[in-house]
Structure formats: structure tokens, C-alpha cells
Amino acid sequence: MSIEYPENYDCRDPIQFAELELKLAGFSETPFGKAALEYIKQTYNIVSNDINGVRRLHQNIAGLVEQVPLAPLLEEELVMTETLEFSNGAYVKSFRKQHPRVPFVYEYDGKYYDDRAVAFVNTDGSVWYGQNGKYRSKREITFPYYRQEQRVYIGEIDTSVPGNYSGTGPNY
């Protein structure tokens, strides 16, 4: 297959690169291709062609897709919520203050926690959150709180070596 490059093509130009790649992949005339190219053009324009700025904007957009707040979480946003807690072999209704934008951020006994502060990633890429045993996702937090989930790659941890595998030690 012979690829016809545009005149004066420069692979170091991110717009030209994106246009050609979208064309070669068959996306250039699709709604996705048009939106992707416009997104790339706008982000480069916003940050004056600074690649690091584009990366930061992209991370923010990816965070929004994953429902990660951009703005800090504030203590005064917590609302009283009815929850079910497992106690003595049964589920019991209780009330606690939770954050409406991130319900796994809450108050308990006068302290604040994020139950998903640490995500554990298996070698197959699946993500899970641990609440018991040696893998614990829960962390105490303070407000204002900028949520940044820590990722721990389980395949990279040699649990045969003595150490702290709870997510708080130097192994992370």
C-alpha cells in the first residue's frame, strides 16, 4: 500500500500528524475524526502550542470522562446520607456525611476518608479497591481535597519480601 503524503508534510507538526493518522485509519470524514481533530487544534491553540500544556488539558479531559472532579472537594459540601453498614452479621441503616460529587468521600467519627484513594491494578489491567487484608484503598484526607487516585500495580509488588503492602509504605 502506497501512502500519499500531503505536500510539505512534517510529522513534528501535531495537526498535520493527526490529520494524516485520522485519514489513514479511515476516520478523517467521520464525526469522531472531525471532533478529534478539532479537539487537538483547540487544545494546541489554548496553550500556545505547548505540548506539556496539551498533555495537562488532555489529563483533565480524561479525568472528567472518569468522573474525577476538577475543583477541590470542600468540607461544607458534605451532606447527611442514609447508608447500609455491615455490623455483627447484618446490614444496619446508619447516617453519615458524604460528598455528593464523590460518594466514597465521607466523614466517620470526626475524620474524613476516601475509600478509593488507592486503586489496585492486576496484571490483566483490571482495577479493584480493597477494604480488608493487606490491600487497603481507604485513606484519611483533609479538606480542601484534590482527588488524585494512586494506582498500585499488583504484578510489580513482590509480596514475598517483608514490607508494608497496605498502600502507605515506601513500596509505593
Image (tube, rainbow, N blue to C red):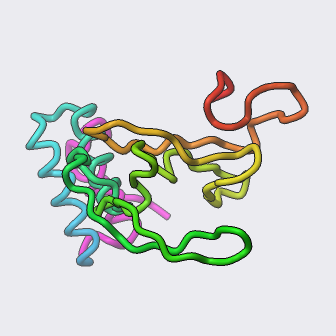
Please state which of residues 125 and 114 is positioned toward the viewer in this rendering: 114
Vertical position of residue 62 compared to residue 52: above or below:
below
> Quadrant of residue 34 in the image?
bottom left
Q: Please tell me which residue is depicted at 46% across the width and 72% down the height of the picture.
A: 83
**Range drawn in magenta:** 1-29
Q: Please tell me which residue is depicted at 62% across the width and 41% down the height of the picture.
A: 152
User: Image check: 89 left or right of 140?
Assistant: right
Residue 131: image location, x then y, percent: 65, 54
Q: Residue furthest top?
A: 170
Residue 1: image location, x then y, percent: 50, 64
Residue 32: image location, x then y, percent: 28, 73
Number of marks in picture = 0
Please state which of residues 64 and 38 is positioned toward the viewer in this rendering: 64
Q: Please tell me which residue is depicted at 58% across the width and 48% down the height of the picture.
A: 137
> Quadrant of residue 128 in the image?
bottom right
User: Image check: 71 left or right of 123?
Assistant: left
Residue 160: image location, x then y, percent: 90, 32
Q: Is residue 14 magenta?
A: yes
